[in-house]
Amino acid sequence: MAPGRRRSGSPLVRWVLRIIAVGYVLGLVALPVGTVVQHTFENGLEPVLESLRNPDFQAAARLGVFVAVISVLINTVFGIGISILIVRYRFPGRRLLNAIIDLPVSISPIVVGIALIFVYGTNGWFGPALNSMGIQIIFATPALVLATVIVALPLVVREVIPVLEEAGTEQDQAAQSLGANGFQRFVRITLPTIRWALAYGVVLSLARSLGEFGAVRVVSGSVAGVSQTPTLFVNDAYQEFGAQAEQDAFTAAFLLMCVAVLFIVVIALLRPKEQNQ
Amino acid sequence: MSISVSGINKRFGDFVALDNVSLEVPTGRLTALLGPSGGGKSTLLRIIAGLEFPDTGSVEIEGVQATWLPPQKRSVGFVFQHYAAFKHMTVFKNVAFGLEIRRKPRAEIRQRVMELLELVHLEQFADRLPSQLSGGQRQRMALARALAVQPEVLLLDEPFGALDAQVRKELRDWLRNLHDEMNVTTIFVTHDQEEALEVSDEIVVINGGRIEQVGAPADLYDRPANDFVMKFLGPVTTLDGQLVRPHDIELLAAPGQEAIEATVTRLTRVGFEVRAELRTSKGGSEPWVQLTRIQAQELDLEPGRSVWLRTTHAPKTLAVS
Ligand SMILES: Nc1ncnc2c1ncn2[C@@H]1O[C@H](COP(=O)(O)OP(=O)(O)OP(=O)(O)O)[C@@H](O)[C@H]1O
Ligand SMILES: [Mg+2]
């Protein structure tokens, strides 16, 4: 901040702005988060441990991690591929592709879910054909993965593209003239160039994938122990009657929150590295 | 012939970047590609390196048909104008890159890289990242990196373009010595005629996608094929409707044979030289002349004074178009 700027504006305005900002954050974030923590540990640690022993919760956690990891793997591979395609190649439809990548950010996840049902559902385009081959997509893990992949698709691409553009093609050409083939250039030049952006994008996708609710809700059917992810578990448990069900909901919500905080810390650590490059 | 380029045409859309270019570069020579911006120098160099492909025509390197070979299959080292350093690798790793790709034994790589770093005076910077080097050091690293794989041909695109005048001059001499030592066929691009004249064995003047003239520096300077080459290679002025080099005009204090009368209109000192601007009494042309300070003193030059002019050298003048 410029030295002159610091003193400008009356102290009163400064205080009012500060109170509004703090109040805003408190009301919107801290208070709800605090409530979750408070409700989770209201009756001590024992009910929390009881929730953790719930087989449905454990199944949901396993499924959630599985779906998130698979989705992130898929998005990482395709994200790198699409980024390279968009930055390094000129082809008809390139701008369209570039625009479509952003679609999942702007359309509601519910719409993504319904669209998936239209395509892969029992009465959808491919549904019957896949069904006759004994492959079930909707109301099973593949649909969860598909929905999550779509929703988190732009996160890796939007992190990697600017870094690739910034790096240009000269290093690649230099490597080529030194004898490196395409694969060697990818491993030795491209990957190290985008590594921090990629790591950042992967963490963002992981967070987004674990937290996804809308699209997953539509395509999952939310069968406890089978197609219920942690967010669905929270939702369903919360709507059930009974103290333990409510406790389960808060415990799962608390854990999701802890994971989110962990990701925020990781992201905060990665950000400076990315900018240093 | 080490590099033989024949009948190269290259268009970018409607724009003709190279128009039927043919060029022979003998083994072991240091050749300068000289020309104004946008003339097609980089395009030609990149076609020789395989970083770009011609629409028609062919490229041969050491007798091998290379027109459609990818860069990694040609024995060509390329140094980019902006160095293209591998930012995430140390200086050592940068230089070792080509050798590692070729799967040389580690001990051999280490020895060769250290030799090269010594050659480019960067041995104490081996563990630094490129971002921790100065521009000139980065450029030398890029050169060492290209030399590491012992290319048959070394191509440099404005190697000193991004450096300040002092460092430029230093590196220029250093490149010349290095070339004499290694004796690798080298082509470097420049739009600085002084650099080309000073360093190279041969100069190729290229303009508007065509080669204007090829020859030894002194030849080109003294016997330019056309106005363009004459103007591009050194200072020119017009005397009696002819292009002349300003240091090829002799000033006399008294009338002499074939000398024409003129009046001094202005004197400017630039370092050790003096520029005299003149107006001839007949024809009214306004040439300027380059003199040493001693010459100017001996003639006692001052604005308004009458002098007599004649061209000293056998005049290499051309009709002004
Ligand atoms: N990839 C490209 N696409 C379109 N036009 C290009 C491309 N590369 C070069 N050109 C054009 O071809 C012409 C020659 O370019 P080139 O880079 O060879 O010039 P140059 O002689 O190296 O100039 P400079 O001294 O400015 O580097 C220029 O007019 C340039 O605009
Ligand atoms: Mg150029």
Image (cartoon, rainbow, N blue to C red):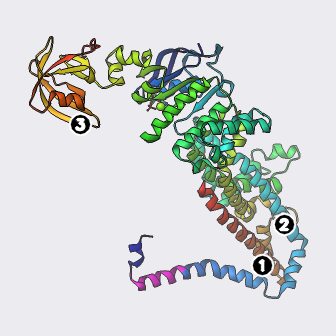
Q: Chain of mark 3?
A: B
At mark 1, the secondary structure is: helix
**Which residue lies at the image location 55% right of the left edge and 39% below the top edge?**
B139
Q: Which residue is mark 3?
A: B269
Q: Specify the amino acid type for callout 2.
A: Ala
User: Which is more toward the observer, A214 or A185?
Assistant: A185
**Which residue lies at the image location 82% right of the left edge and 77% below the top edge?**
A248
Say above or below: A57 vs A106: below
Residue A11 is one of the magenta-drawn residues: yes
Task: Give the x, y percent position of residue B314.
Answer: 28, 11
Q: Which residue is mark 2?
A: A60
Picture quadrant of residue A32: bottom right
User: Which is more toward the observer, B257 or B61?
Assistant: B257
Q: Specify the amino acid type for callout 1.
A: Phe
Task: Give the x, y percent position of residue A7.
Answer: 40, 78
In the image, taking residue B143 as reference, residue A187 lies left or right, namely: right
Q: Which residues are magenta?
A: A9-21
Query: Which residue is farthest bottom?
Result: A43
Q: Earlier in the sequence, mark 2 or mark 1?
A: 2
Question: In which quadrant of the rendered image does the C terminus of chain B lie?
Answer: top left
In the image, taking residue A69 as reference, residue A7 lies left or right, namely: left
In the image, taking residue B196 as reference, residue A75 lies left or right, namely: right
At mark 2, the secondary structure is: helix
